[in-house]
Image: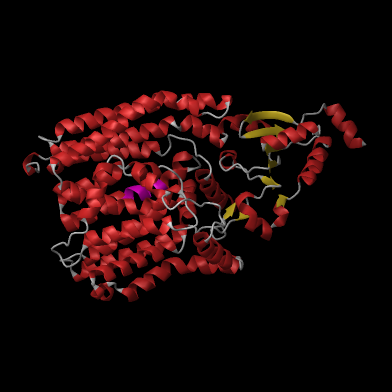
Amino acid sequence: MKTNLTTSPYESNRTLWAVLIAFLLTWFYMLGARTLVPTDEGRYAEMAREMVATGDWITLRLNGIKYFEKPPLQNWMNALTFSLFGLGDWQARLWTGLCGLIGIFVSSYTAFKIYGRRIAVITALVLGSSFYWAAMGHINTLDMGLSGMMTLALCGLLLAQRDGASDKEQRNGMLLCWAGMALATMSKGLIGFVLPGAVLVLYTLWTRDFGLWLRLHMGKGLLLFFAITTPWFILVWQANPEHPHFFFIHEHFQRFTSTVHKRGGAWYYFFPLLIIGIVPWLGLLVQSLLKALKKESSQFQAKKMLLVWSVFIFFFFSISGSKLPSYILPIFPALAILIACAIEELSSLQIKLNAGLLILIGAGSLASAGKIGGLAKHAYEIPFYVAMIPWAYAAAGIALVGGILALILVKQKRDFSIIVLAVSAYVGGQVVFIGHDQWGKYSAGFYHVPAIQAELKADTPIYAVGRYEQSLPFYLQRTTILVEHPDEMEFGLGMQPQLWIRKRDDFIQQWQEMATANKSAVAFLNPAIYEDFKQKSIPMRVIGNDPKRVIIALPVQDPATAKKHNSN
């Protein structure tokens, strides 16, 4: 039973503006509410910082070393943000946050043009509150940037091909699609156009709508695509002849077909992530996918396109030899539109069952939140886990109350019930994020920053022995000298071997020589290496330690003793 439109909050501009403003204030506040957590957040913030520091916007570097794994769009946008607003947590996440918002608003606008105002409002509510989308919109990683640009491609195609689109709308929609694919390619590589292209092929095979290929404005589109993508690839190739082989062969073909990156996973790897990520709409997911199988009255089958997009991308990454949790993020805008359409057709009972599922999640979380402290592997970590408990209780309570209130409202005020579900899930998810920050600071090594900064002079080197810190270089605004452990910079160090110390013994000799000369230096050590240094009586002072790392500095000598050593 649908709510009378005259009483629906979807028809009240005042209500929608209030929800939107509150949503945006929370969204932007949360961009700076947490420390940058390794690995991705620290890595991409540091790469952009180095881009600004060196003035080189063509050759990407991490820790001063050539880094060719990904294209430059996110680093460019982060570097631009740093140039305009300075270094900081929210600045490092601003592009990611904007891409999340782009996905929400473009999906909602597309739903409006195809299905009307009500579906548009529900689409925005569903996508903005889906746990995964709201979470990844606040993490400085490439996948939200990729997803935002791929959403432009998907929605551009839907807008162009929908029934009733004028010639101008068809042309502009397809140019948006081609631009979206180009920007997606500049975000994360060839999947930016390979995945949309494969979806298009599968859709036309399914629907037999082969005439669609004549409506792609391929000539103008290809010109636009290559105008956006080609310049950087040519410039980086000219500056670094080794780039094309590593980028196209190692980072694409080998990544997909093998486990060379050691990021494998079972075929069902992404199913739990989808289940968690689509909350609070999990109870409507299956029905939404099934309803998309039905033939629409229009010639262009938008729901089938959305279904193919969702299923194929999910399948593609499920069979890939490289898996990370955020890889399936591009399917969420498509799922949001499908869920929004289904909500308008489903019975009140099904909406109640979905609300009941959020109640169960809230109740289960309340029952288990007090046990979070038991997850700690070391006594040192217990306070960071315990610090999450009040926030976990708060988030669970919000989910529980929101689910109950939504359940009560379904019969008489169904649209308000949907808004309550969205708001409670969104706020609860952000509360969980805030509660994680104490652990995030520990993971990043942020608590040690003051002690390290106290040791640093303009010429003080920082060594990373047996481990690479992804976030500390950004906060210290210093690169490090890798020792023994190349981490993900192995390819770049092969091109620039002078930028690291391959053998631990060579580092020890250099460290001892600096100690004799009374110079300053800092080193991040793997804890096992620290124990080895103690046994060898290496001169050092511990200025910070935890289960993940030990941070040492050279001992300070008496000036007279240092002068005597130097004269000898």
Q: Residue furthest right?
A: 568
Question: Above or below — where is 330 with respect to 369?
Answer: below
Q: Quadrant of residue 528?
A: top right
* Residue nearest the observer in this picture, 24 or 437: 437
The answer to whether residue 281 is left or right of residue 192 is left
Asked if residue 120 can be seen in this view, the reply is: no
Instruction: Quarter of the image for the C terminus: give it.
Output: top right
- Seen in the image, is 105 located left or right of residue 479? left
Magenta segment's dominant SS is: helix
- For the residue pair 317 and 230, the one nearer the viewer reads as 317
Q: Is residue 209 above or below residue 291?
A: below
Q: Determine whether, in the image, residue 386 is placed left or right of residue 404.
A: right
Residue 444, horizontal then vertical, whole percent: 55, 37
Q: Is residue 126 magenta?
A: no
Near-viewer residue (77 or 316): 316
Q: Quadrant of residue 228?
A: bottom left
Q: Position of residue 89 (x, y in %)?
A: 47, 39
Percent position of residue 326, x then y: 42, 49
Residue 124 position, x and y percent, is: 25, 46
Q: Is residue 476 visible?
A: yes
Q: Residue at x 47, y 52 (%)?
A: 323
Q: Residue at x 39, y 32 (%)?
A: 432
Q: Is residue 5 left or right of residue 236?
A: left
| Magenta segment boundaries in residue numbering | 96-103
